[in-house]
Each structure stands twice: as structure tokens, then as C-alpha cells.
Image: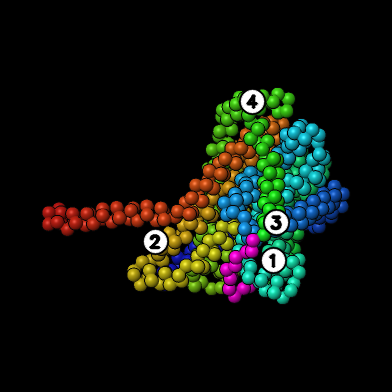
């Protein structure tokens, strides 16, 4: 047991070292930079200059306005979508179909959202051509609002959908017996138990849009937001790192406030002693209304992103609308594109491997160890910090912290940034799985003579392989689509697909934007399908491992038998 403690202490120390180097030190460096004035003196001057800048104040107001309205719309829509999947008698296959199509936008970088809206609803857009006239101006507020809603709908939907699983529907009958009106029954049995999750979804949606760089970079126009303001200050013709560091720190303040609000919202969560099974009454009107809602939402998503599958096969949209594969071949045969694609897949794969190991190790310390409570609290704190700090802020912190170091302008810095940035969700996933396993397995392994590490690899990991596959695919997809976090740390030699899209946008190569987006989308779909299959058939992995152990066991027995022969013993002597 003492050896177990040594091994766990080593893992704990390694995780703390990673987060100290990749999170704490960069953020402290960013904070210190924000107080260093251009003259070299220390003071509040950078903050005063930023807060007196009317352009920054306007950008901040724009961000709060569009993100606040977007979050309200997204949460309302996501709530109804999730509610309908749990409280209707629609066919199960149709419900599965709906879930798949709602989360499809998650497989695309946010840069693509803006271009999809432009090419769909712009003056020469696909939908505009079908309708006959442009419905509204898509640059600025309305374009951002539509794009943000599409972007934040999948994570808000997933959060609410999963929470609805733990709401006891039996209370619907109780409320009806008590004589409550349908509206009151809906509030008491569906809205009230979900208030904490609704608040969490609102905060999640708000900050996803508030800190995103990709969408405003493509469709923001003259309607500047705080993310584009930070980018222009840091990466403009004349970079101003002092003002940039101050803006980045200011962007942290709403995140800290949000963390407090999340703590408060947890008080509104219901705890049921038991979740009763309940058969919903038949109601064709209700089911038909939700079916129409789902069809409208899916049709809207497909209509906006359909252009992504059209432009790569058109000679020159919208001027020469003739089918051709010339554009696709020209772009895919470009050696630089192939190189960037390979780099992106390798970076996403390495990030998924390292991120999965890091999250798994931290969850082991939290759920499968007898280390002091402070150690477990620190693991939760790591998850809380990485979930709170906006990607752009962490990217700026990395820029300041690692400039001049050996890992500057290398893929290592991108992998490290992505690994800690995407730590929280995989950590929570595996923490939930590990906490459900038999707590005595390590003790049983020790009694049988196995070390703690051997028990983990032989027993614990095989019984959580389903979650491991889900963790890997989640991190891979997020690493392949991210732009806000890495935009400040990539260079010409370390370019990935999302930064290549940014470059293509700058040179107005919009056909290249959609081809690269299509590459990202198809790659993520393949990875998601493969790892979902493995997660649902993790017995295949266990079977392969058992056969491998049998083969090695047979070889070991043969070797022992050969060395036990008299001739072999004499030869050995």
C-alpha cells in the first residue's frame, strides 16, 4: 500500500507540474505584463488607457449585447429541443436522427459558421438566390447572432438533454391530481427542476460566444467585439502588447463572475431519492408540434451549411455555377494543403492522447486514491480553472510565457495548450465512470500480489475503455476545430487547418475555406463514428487484450519449459 501511495504521489506531482507550467505560470506572466507600462514602470496605466478607449468600450458593449441575446435564444431553443425528446412519444429512430443533426455543427471550426451564413444569406447566397432577394443584412449584429446561436446550440442542448434524464416525470401525474393548470404543471415538473442547468447553459452559451474569435473574424464587419479587438491589438500592423495584456485580463473578470453564478445556480438543482419509470400519455398534437419544430431546426442548419458541400464542386461561385471537380482537385493537390492537413491530424491525435492520459491520471487521484483531501481538491481546481479561462486569454498568456523558449513556434506548444484547454470535460467524464467502479479492486489486486499500476492497467482501465474512447474522440474533435486558443501561438511552420482557413480568408480564397472546412468536417465525422463504435463495443478491445495475454502466457510457459530441461540447465550452467 505504501508503494501505491508513492505511485499516486508521483502522478499527482506530475499533474501539478504540468498545470503549473501550462496554466499558472502563463497567467501570472500575463498579469504581470498588464502592469508594465511602455516606459518600463509599473502601474495601472494600461488599464486606464484601455478603459478610456472608446473603440474598446464599444466592442465590449457589442459583445455583451449580442452574446446576452444569443444565450437567451439558444437556451430557450435548446430547452424545448431537449424537452421534446424526453416528453413526447415520437419514434426513437426519429429522436436519434434529431440528436445527430443538432450536434453536427460541433464538427466544424467557428470560422466556417460565418462564411456559411455569408454564402447562404448574403446578396449572392444560396438561400438568397432560391428566395429571390436578400432577407436582411448579414454583416454585423444579425450575422453574429445567427452564427452564435448555431455555434452554441449543440453544447447547450447536450447539457440540458442529459439533465432531463434525471428529472422524475412521475410528478406530472401528481401535479395534475393536485388540479394545477397545464402551464403550472410544466413549470413545476420541467422548468423548476432544471433551473440550475438552465442557468449553467446560459452562462456556457454566453461565454462561448463572448470569447470566440472565429465567427466575428469572418462575419463581424464593422460591428467589432472584444475578441476581435484583442486580436487586432495583439496581431495588428503595430502590435500593442501592453494594451493586449490588459484586455486579456479584463476578459477574465466576467469569467470569474460566471464561476460565482454557477456556484449559486447549483442550489437550484433538485435531488430525487428515486427516478420513477413513467409512460407518457398519447398526444398527437403535442408530438406533431415538436416534430415540426425539429424539422424546422434541422432544415435551417442544413440550409445554412449546405453551401459547404456546393462551393467545392462549382467552378466559381456565384459567377460560374457549373459543376466541376477542378476546384477540389486544385486545392487538394496543393502540397502545402496536404502538409497542413497531416500536421493538423497529428497535432489533434497527439493532443487527444496526452489530454486523455492527463485527465485519466487526475481522475485516478481524485476517485481511486487515499491521498489527502487537498490533493483531490487541487485536481478539481485544475478543471475549474481551465474551464473558466477563455481560450484567447490562455493563448495570449502562452504567447508571453513561451516567447524566446525552445518550444516557441513548435507543435509542442500547440499540443500543450490544447491538452490543458480541453481538460475539464474529459476529466469529468472519466471521474464519473471511475467513481462507479468497485472501490475494493485495488485492495484485491494487492492481496493477489499485483502492484497498484498493474491493477490499474489490468482491471481499472479495461473496465472504463468505453469512456476512454469517448474522451479521445472529444479531445480530437475539439483540437481539430479550435482557433481562438491557438491563433496567437501558431506560425508559418506550425500552421494547422483552422489557421490556414484564416490565411485563406485574408487572401479571399473562399473556395479554399470551404474545402478545408469540408476536410475538417469529414475527418471529425470519421473519428467520431469509429470511436463511438469502439465505445459501444469495448468488449472487442478486451477480447484482443485477452488473446494477447494468452499468446504471451503461452510463450512464457514454453520458455520456462525449455529452461527446465536438463540439457538446457547444463548449458545455462
Above or below, 135 relative to 396: above
Q: Residue at x 74, y 66 (%)?
A: 182
From the viewer's side, name the closer residue of 129 and 330: 129
User: Of callouts 2 and 3, which one flags the residue occurring earlier in the amino acid sequence?
Assistant: 3
Q: Is residue 520 in view from this perspective?
A: yes
Residues at marks 2 and 3, CA–CA distance in whole angstroms: 53 Å
**Crowd around label 4: few <14 · some 14–19 · many ≥20 (10 Å):** some
From the viewer's side, name the closer residue of 241 and 305: 305
- Residue 214 in the image: state x and y as whole percent: 70, 44
- Overall secondary structure of the magenta stretch? loop
User: Of callouts 1 and 4, which one flags the residue occurring earlier in the amino acid sequence?
Assistant: 1
Residue where numbered disc 2 is placed: 458
Q: Which mark is drawn over residue 323?
A: 4
Nearest to the eye among marks 2 and 3: give it. 3
In the picture provided, is 256 more to the left or to the right than 449?
right
Residues at marks 1 and 4, CA–CA distance in whole angstroms: 50 Å
Q: Residue at x 73, y 25 (%)?
A: 319
Q: Residue at x 63, y 31 (%)?
A: 312
Residues at marks 2 and 4, CA–CA distance in whole angstroms: 55 Å
Amino acid at each position: 500500500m505504501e508503494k501505491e501511495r508513492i505511485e499516486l504521489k508521483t502522478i499527482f506531482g506530475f499533474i501539478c507540474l504540468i498545470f503549473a507550467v501550462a496554466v499558472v505560470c502563463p497567467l501570472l506572466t500575463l498579469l504581470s505584463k498588464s502592469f508594465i507600462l511602455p516606459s518600463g514602470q509599473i502601474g495601472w496605466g494600461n488599464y486606464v488607457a484601455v478603459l478610456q478607449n472608446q473603440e474598446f468600450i464599444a466592442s465590449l458593449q457589442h459583445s455583451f449585447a449580442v452574446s446576452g441575446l444569443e444565450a437567451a435564444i439558444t437556451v430557450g431553443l435548446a430547452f424545448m429541443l431537449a424537452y421534446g425528446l424526453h416528453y413526447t412519444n415520437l419514434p426513437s429512430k426519429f429522436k436519434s436522427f434529431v440528436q445527430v443533426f443538432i450536434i453536427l455543427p460541433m464538427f466544424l471550426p467557428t470560422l466556417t459558421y460565418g462564411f456559411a451564413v455569408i454564402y447562404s444569406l448574403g446578396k449572392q447566397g444560396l438561400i438568397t438566390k432560391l428566395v429571390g432577394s436578400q432577407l436582411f443584412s448579414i454583416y454585423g449584429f444579425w450575422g453574429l447572432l445567427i452564427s452564435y446561436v448555431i455555434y452554441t446550440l449543440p453544447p447547450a442542448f447536450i447539457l440540458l438533454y442529459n439533465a432531463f434524464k434525471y428529472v422524475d416525470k412521475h410528478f406530472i401525474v401528481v401535479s395534475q391530481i393536485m388540479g394545477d393548470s397545464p402551464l403550472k404543471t410544466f413549470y413545476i415538473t420541467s422548468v423548476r427542476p432544471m433551473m440550475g442547468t438552465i442557468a449553467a447553459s446560459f452562462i456556457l452559451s454566453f461565454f462561448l460566444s463572448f470569447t470566440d474569435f472565429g465567427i466575428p473574424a469572418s462575419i463581424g464587419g464593422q460591428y467589432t467585439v472584444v475578441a476581435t479587438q484583442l486580436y487586432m491589438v495583439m496581431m495588428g500592423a503595430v502590435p500593442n502588447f501592453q494594451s493586449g495584456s490588459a484586455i486579456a485580463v479584463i476578459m477574465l473578470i466576467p469569467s470569474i463572475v460566471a464561476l460565482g453564478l454557477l456556484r449559486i445556480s447549483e442550489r437550484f438543482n433538485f435531488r430525487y431519492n428515486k427516478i420513477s419509470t413513467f409512460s407518457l400519455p398519447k398526444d398527437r398534437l403535442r408530438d406533431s408540434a415538436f416534430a415540426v419544430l425539429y424539422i424546422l431546426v434541422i432544415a435551417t442548419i442544413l440550409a445554412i451549411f449546405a453551401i459547404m458541400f456546393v462551393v467545392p464542386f462549382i467552378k466559381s461561385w456565384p459567377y460560374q455555377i457549373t459543376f466541376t471537380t477542378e476546384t477540389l482537385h486544385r486545392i487538394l493537390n496543393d502540397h502545402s494543403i496536404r502538409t497542413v492537413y497531416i500536421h493538423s491530424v497529428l497535432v489533434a491525435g497527439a493532443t487527444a492522447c496526452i489530454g486523455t492520459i492527463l485527465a485519466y491520471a487526475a481522475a485516478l487521484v481524485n476517485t481511486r486514491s487515499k491521498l489527502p483531501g487537498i490533493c483531490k481538491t487541487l485536481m478539481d481546481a485544475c478543471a475549474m480553472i481551465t474551464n473558466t479561462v477563455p481560450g484567447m486569454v490562455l493563448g495570449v498568456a502562452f504567447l508571453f510565457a513561451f516567447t524566446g523558449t525552445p518550444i516557441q513556434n513548435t507543435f509542442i506548444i500547440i499540443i500543450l495548450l490544447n491538452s490543458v484547454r480541453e481538460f475539464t470535460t474529459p476529466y469529468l467524464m472519466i471521474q464519473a465512470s471511475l467513481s462507479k467502479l468497485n472501490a475494493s479492486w485495488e485492495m484485491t489486486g494487492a492481496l493477489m500480489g499485483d502492484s497498484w499500476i498493474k491493477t490499474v492497467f489490468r482491471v481499472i482501465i479495461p473496465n472504463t475503455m468505453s469512456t476512454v474512447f469517448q474522451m479521445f474522440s472529444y479531445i480530437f474533435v475539439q483540437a481539430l476545430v479550435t482557433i481562438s486558443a491557438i491563433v496567437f501561438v501558431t506560425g508559418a511552420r506550425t500552421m494547422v487547418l483552422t489557421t490556414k482557413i484564416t490565411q485563406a480568408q485574408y487572401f479571399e480564397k473562399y473556395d479554399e475555406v470551404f474545402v478545408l472546412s469540408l476536410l475538417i468536417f469529414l475527418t471529425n465525422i470519421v473519428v467520431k463514428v469509429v470511436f463511438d463504435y469502439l465505445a459501444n463495443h469495448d468488449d472487442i478491445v478486451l477480447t484482443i487484450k485477452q488473446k494477447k495475454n494468452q499468446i504471451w502466457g503461452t510463450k512464457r510457459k514454453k520458455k520456462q519449459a525449455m529452461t527446465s530441461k536438463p540439457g538446457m540447465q547444463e548449458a545455462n550452467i
